[in-house]
Structures are given as C-alpha cells and as structure tokens.
Image: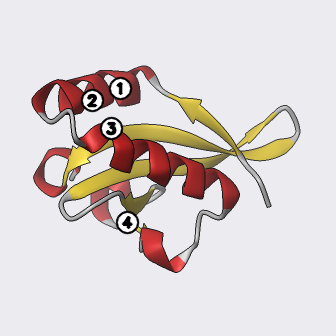
Amino acid sequence: MTRKLLKSAAFIRSAKRLLKKDSKAAADLQATLEQLTADAFHPTLKTHKLKGQLADCWSCSAGYDLRIVFEFVQHEGEEAILLLAAGTHDEVY
C-alpha cells in the first residue's frame, strides 16, 4: 500500500539541520522515505510505536543512529504519513 508523505514544518527544520550537520545522511534519509512510502512496516525500517509523550507516534530507523518520527493520518480520504521529526536517537526522543 503506497502512502503519501506529508512533511510538517518541524520535520523540514530538523531535516535541514541534520543535512547541514551531516551531508552524507541525505542518501539514507531519501532511501528511508521511499521505503516508508512503499511499506511503512518493512523489516529494514524497524518501525515501532512510541510511548510516553509520543504515544500516538511511530518511529523508524534511517541508518545507524538516524530516526524518523511520524504519525499515520487521514489526508484527502486516504491514509497518509505525517513526518514529524528527523535526527539522531537523542534529538528526536
């Protein structure tokens, strides 16, 4: 099931900050977003539900210490993925 990706302002800021800090992360981030669109629960993404303050959110791995936090939302009558944050494990949690 292909889902549309919606980028929040916070995600755009965090992705820009990440890419400014580590330009090599761009390829990992792009590959992960493509995989997330195609299959959000593909084993390579290690997608998991979060707890605590981020209880309604999900996270996936985009590399060794790179994470993407997102929510499943309804957009134009279909399920979409709202990207909330990107960064290292410590930055996004």
* Number of residues whose C-alpha sits closer than 10 Å to that of mark 3, classed few (under 14), some (14–19) or many (20 or more): some
Tell me: residue 19, above or below residue 28. Answer: above
Q: Nearer the viewer, mark 3 or mark 1?
A: 3
Q: Earlier in the sequence, mark 4 or mark 3?
A: 3
Residue 9 higher or lower than 79, as above or below: above
Q: Element at badge 4?
A: loop
| Residue position for label 4 | 50
Q: Report the mark closest to the observer, 4 or 3.
A: 3
Asked where in the image residue 87 lies, by quadrant, the reply is: top left
**What is the C-alpha distance between the residues marked 1 and 2?**
6 Å
CA distance separating discs 4 and 1: 18 Å
User: Mark 1 sits on what residue?
Assistant: 10
Numbered disc 2: secondary structure: helix
Q: Tell me the tag on residue 82.
A: none
Q: Mark 2 sits on what residue?
A: 14
Q: Nearer the viewer, mark 2 or mark 3?
A: 3
